[in-house]
Amino acid sequence: MTPAQAAAAAQTAMAASIAKQKESIRAQAAAVSHKPTPDSAAFFTAPWVEAVPLPTAGAFAMAATSAAICDPMPAMDLDKLVTESAQRESVRADLIRAVIGEESAGRPCAVSVKGAQGLMQLMPSTADQFGVKDPFDPKQNVDAGTKLLKQLLDKYGGDLAKTLSAYNAGSVRVDVADGVPPIAETENYVADILSKLSAQ
């Protein structure tokens, strides 16, 4: 195969992959909103969806709503990304894994009703803060999510409850409450992850 043929083949494969991801995002948005979603020429354009009651709080509620949208990332591949990010940022690998499990159940195409995306459910502002070009790219997503965890761990002196609360509900709410804010979703989120960590 010539270099030109190889490049053409790679472009074809990339186009097919992008089309598949776009369809996955549209399907997930439709599953949440129970409304059909229009096609879009822009890859990152996804329809806004109205908030709907979720069947669970804390443990990745989207997984219960749209579990068939995409499969979880293979454990070996995810573990490699987590280990590398953990070493770079000096963050516990088990903490990163627990956050990913709670946020997306390991599904790289996950999109929440609030607009959070990917394995570690990055909000667009967080993705921008850490220079993420593609929030659905597992490596970029895990790297940025780990950097955010590191930032929060430093801010709260290693306090896991405050760090996880801020990851879920934002630092402002944690600072106002001087601890886990009295939000049921956040309380469940923190309890679930701390329980998983203590069980290891």
Image: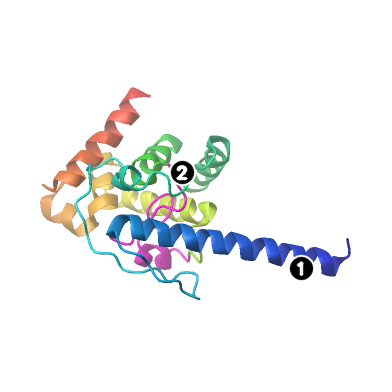
Q: Which residue is mark 2?
A: 90
SS for tag 2? loop
Q: Is residue 122 visible?
A: no
Q: Is residue 16 visible?
A: yes
| Circle 2 Cα neighbour tier, 10 Å, few/some/many (<14 / 14–19 / ≥20) | few
85 relative to 149 in the view: left or right = right
Instruction: Decide which of 183, 23 is in the foreground and name it.
Output: 23
The C terminus is located in which quarter? top left
Contact flag, marks 1 and 2 (Cβ < 8 Å): no
| Circle 1 Cα neighbour tier, 10 Å, few/some/many (<14 / 14–19 / ≥20) | few
Determine which of the numbered discs, if any, sits on residue 73 in the image.
none
Residue found at x 37% / y 49%: 149
6 relative to 25 in the view: left or right = right
Residue found at x 35% / y 60%: 30
Indicate yes or no whether the magenta region holds residue 21: no
Residue found at x 37% / y 63%: 126
Mark 1 or mark 2: which comes first in sequence? Answer: 1
Residue 176 in picture, x, y percent from top left:
12, 56
* Mark count: 2
Indicate yes or no whether the magenta region holds residue 115: yes
Q: Which residues are magenta?
A: 106-131
Quarter location, residue 96: top left
Quarter location, residue 125: bottom left
Q: Which residue is mark 1?
A: 8
- Of circles 1 and 2, the one toward us is 1
SS for tag 1? helix
Q: Residue furthest right?
A: 2
Residue found at x 26% / y 34%: 192
Kindly identify the amino acid type of the residue bearing the numbered disc 1. Ala
Kindly identify the amino acid type of the residue bearing the numbered disc 2. Ser
